Structure formats: structure tokens, C-alpha cells
Image (cartoon, rainbow, N blue to C red):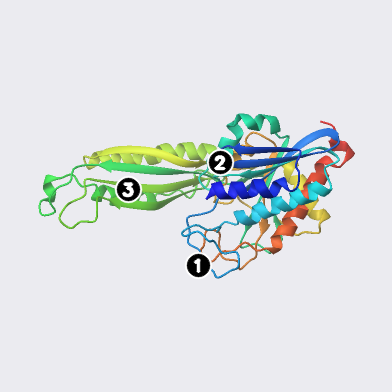
Amino acid sequence: MEDSTSTAIKVHISEYTPDNLVTGLGGRGIAAEFTGSEPGLRILLRCDMDALPISEVMNIPHRSVFDGVSHKCGHDGHMAILMGVAARLHKHPPAGGSVVLLFQPAEETGEGARKVIIDSKFRDIEPDFVFALHNLPGFPLGSIILKNGAFSSASRGITVELTGASSHASEPQKGESPALAIAQIIEAFTSMSLSSISMDDAAMLTVTHVRAGEKAFGTTPGEGCVLAALRTRGSEAMNIISRRIEKMAETIAETNNLKCRISWTDEFPVTENSGKAVDIIRSAAVNLGLRTVQPDAPFPWSEDFGHFTNKYPGALFGIGAGVNTPALHSPEYDFPDELISLGVDIFIEIINELLNCSDHIMK
């Protein structure tokens, strides 16, 4: 579905005549650059463009027309916000420097940001600052959620593949079924005390999928797997706990005479916000008279924007989607359209803070 989305973005953003348009960035990404008349900083504003494998259940005018695919994380709204910024920049280009609007693919898998950054085409639009927003249900509509340092957690997915030998179900002793080992791994992963390595490094391990053999009554399973998601607030905690989990699974497999293969995927780094970038967002929010909220701890979910903040000064911030709005990734979720103009306004204020003030025009 990203192919059609990317094509639609290219057609629509071209109407705003950016000074530079980069396509095929990191796969299906699109970047549009609007340049001022004076030299200065280059700011990158990023939105995510991928959807989710969730069937549309809501009877809304903009409901998904594709079976089993819908925008249940609000990425459609994020794209609309950046299109609104493009419309503003078309009429009022920055005084100096330039603004890059990045429509990034594959955020949900943790691959998109990294692929964009390592793409050779990205070198020509490498930024001095990076910013992104994400709508957040559970917070007052239109509020701005800010935090210095770690904003969202690191995460990665572990797949534990177990191989034994199948047998007739009437003679299970003649096989090596992974069923008991799978149950032990589930129990170990679920009960493992990961509430904290230290006061600052909380962690969470969640079993997300389990399979053993095939659907049959006459055969015992000869292989199976367990998938789990590990989330931590810090990179060091991620490394320590990852090794601990691997050892745990390998020991259980060995005890049950099974071969064990472990792999990791869907890796997201911690998104670390720079203090200067957060101050700029806070100033923009104050200028617009918006309420700001500062959470005490990093959010447990992950965002691949951390690849950008690991390399460039910047920040990810939240925009409240309403206290009683259904949660992200819920079939009942729908992006609140009221946030589109508000998102445009705060991005434009960020641009003004950095590019349209004389103190910031020169690099």
C-alpha cells in the first residue's frame, strides 16, 4: 500500500512547487525542500506514512478502501499536517535556510528511518535539526507533550525457534515435542521480573505469538516458536536483558533436548530529545497559547525517529488526541481532524523560531 501512498504524496506535494523534490528515499520515501533567500539552518520535519494490518470497522467518510489495512495509528493525519505545512511554505518560504518535509515509509517495522538516513540521496538534504510529532490519545485534545532526554523506549522483537522431532500422537515418547519447552518459555518470559534493572531503566517483555506444529490430532509437534517484544528505557538495559533472555531460552531448549535458533527483528532505538529542541517546541507552544504536558517517564512504546535523534539534534513530541479517544492500533481509533491545523501551526512556529529570527539565519 505504500506504493500508492507514495505516488499520491508526490503528486500532491508537487502542487506546492518545492525547490527540491527527492523520491524513492529509503525505498518509498518522499522529501520536499523549501529554501529561503538567505543561507541558514536546514530543518527536517518528518511524518510517517505507513498503515497497519488492521481491518477498518468504522463507518466514516474516509474509511480505508483496502481489506485488512487501515490507518489506526494516525499516520494519515500526520501526512495531512505536513501537507498543510507545505501549503504555508509555498505562500511564505522561510526567510533563511531551508525546510525539508520528509514523508517516511516503514515506521511501524522500525526500518524506515534507518533506510532513509543511509540512502545516498539523503546526503544532499542532511539536516541541522529534526522534529516530528505523534498524536497521543489519553491526553487533552491539542495539548503538547514534551520531555527532555528519553521520550520513547527502545524495543526489539525476539523469535525463539525450537526444533525437535514429531511422532504419532499415541506414542509421544518416540518424539521430541517442543510443547513443554514453549510453555516453559512463555511462563519464564511472562513471570520474569523486568520491572527494573535500576530506578531509571524499567523494562517490559511481552509474548506476542506462539506456534507449535500443525493443526492435527494424530501427530505431535516437531517444531514451534515463541515471539516476544522487549522494551526498555535505555540502551544498556536493552543489551543486558537481551542476553539474559537468550540464555534463558537456550537453557530451556537444552533441558528439553531441542535445537534452538534465536533471531531479533523490529529494532527501535530510544528516542532521545535534545534540550535545545525541546525548548524550541515549548516556546512555539507558548506562542500559540497551547497547554504543555511533561510526562515523568519515557513512553513504553517505540518510534524509529530515534534513528534521527541519535544522529541529529532534535525532538519527538506528542499532540494530545483527546482523553477519551480510543487507543492507537485499536480498530475503533480515528485521527481527530481538529489536530491538522494545530499541527501545522506548531510546525510553522518551530520554523519561525529557528529560521525566521535573525539570530538563527546564519549557520
Q: Amino acid at mark 2?
A: Gly
Kindly identify which residue carries mark 2: 112
Image quarter where the C terminus lies is top right
- What residue is shown at x 52% (from left), y 62% (from top)? 330
Q: Is residue 190 left or right of residue 16?
A: left
Q: Which residue is mark 3?
A: 185
Mark 2 and mark 3 lie on one chain; the one further toward the N terminus is: 2
Could you give the CA–CA distance between mark 2 and mark 3, rounded to whole angstroms? 31 Å
The kind of residue on which mark 1 rests is Val
Find numbered disc 2 in the image and state the secondary structure of the residue it sits on: helix
Q: Nearer the viewer, mark 3 or mark 1?
A: 1
Please give left or right for residue 8 compared with residue 18 in the image.
Answer: left
Circles 3 and 1: CB atoms closer than 8 Å: no
Q: Amino acid at mark 3?
A: Ile
Q: Secondary structure at mark 1?
A: loop
Residue designated by label 1: 57
Residue 282 seen in the current view = no
Residue at x 77%, y 54% (from the top left corner): 345
